[in-house]
Amino acid sequence: MNSVDPARVRKIRIALLLGALALFALLYAPQPVLPQLARDFVLDPGTAALLVSASTLGLAVAAIPLGTMSEAVGRRRTMIMALLIAEILGLLLPSVPFFPVLVVLRLVQGAAIAGLAAVATAYLAEETGGEQMGTTMGLYVAGTTIGGMAGRLLGGVVGDFAGWHGGMLAVALLAGMCTVLFVVLLPAERNHARQPLSWHPLLSGLRAALGDPVLYAPYLVAALGMGVFVTVYNVLGFRITAPPLLVPPSLAALAFLAYAAGTVTSTLAGRAADRWGRTRVLLTGLAVSALGLLLMLANTLLVIVVGLVVFTGGFFAAHSVASGWVGARASASARGQASALYQFAYYGGSSVGGVLGGTAYGAWGWSGMTVLLCCWLAVAAVGVWIARSAPKRVLVQVASES
């Protein structure tokens, strides 16, 4: 492996931060305008949320194939083509007049986005030499939080005046600017040896990625944590714009400023994990997320916002550490597949959890939904605790491969 050039590493980090910003802005573009979409198409909250779940389902399904394809065609080429296709679809979506067609196109857009989401961790681990992986992944996840916050905020504010069409178009234009910069700045890989496409590397890589029981902990955190997260943000607009709070949609969009907490905590958590250990920081992040959910049970807007900030900060801290854990622990031969499996769990959890959580909100209200979401976080924490107590023999074996 070539020596690590600090200037090149900084350039990679900036490029991937911009790519993550574009990715998350596009992925969740409909979320801030779900109430307007539900009104225009005469939908209930759970059905409207299919526009979010469809894209994350497409991402989950395509993550492993595209992560494997990057082994043959190159990491950079895969990520660039994926983001360009997703951006083109993002510009087309606001002009689609039929909800079923919107859902199908969002499914395709999510599948395209997988080419960046599933490959970024492997690219970072290879091109930065694995040095300070916690810090590097923290910066990448910070880009996802900035994209999520900026896209949702812009879409919500514009959508209040220009309808959901204008809101989604504004997000696509923002993502387009980030995509151009991403293409210009991202260096070609130096440390990845391309492999011919065949079933054998795919199956052997998957076996290796699935063969380490410790990796099941970050997979579990990804699936359940993201299910909780997307549920809260899908449903929040419906809750605070309805009685008794009756917050105007343009002001309700300001709730997405809570993403700023994730930008800070994802970076800090990565550094903390490098210093104090992953499991300790990861369990703390999950506990903080649960505390935020409990605070949001209040019927006072200020307390709800504080709870949302706490919840968001805790979630992104946990996600940053869990994703970095996968990149640092997976063996070199399985790093692409392990990263893809993490993304499969993450966005599969978003798709399934978003639908189940929205259904729970419709059936049991915010309180009943909160009980369900806290249970999901508790199961994830148990998985992390079990991984913490994994036999030393497994730890030594996998560490020697990394």
Image: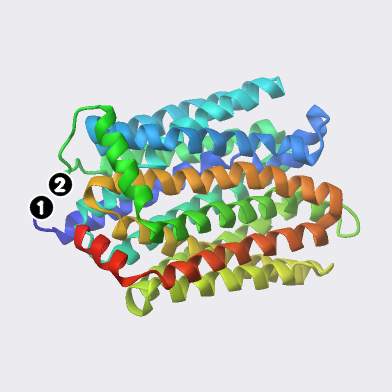
Which secondary structure lies at badge 1?
Answer: loop
Amino acid bearing label 2: Asn
Residue at image x 81%, y 54%?
239
| Residue plotted at (71% across, 24% down) | 99
Between 176 and 214, the residue placed more toward the observer is: 214
Does residue 13 show up?
Answer: yes
Nearer-the-camera pick, 263 or 190: 190
Are there few (<14), some (14-19), or many (20+) residues within 10 Å of tag 2? some
Quickly name the residue at label 1.
1
Q: Residue at x 84, y 67 (%)?
A: 299
243 to the left or right of 184: right
**Quadrant of the image for the C terminus?**
bottom left
Q: Residue furthest right?
A: 244
Q: Which label number is shown at residue 88?
A: none
Q: Residue 261, can we see it?
A: no
- Residue 388: x %, y % from top left: 43, 72
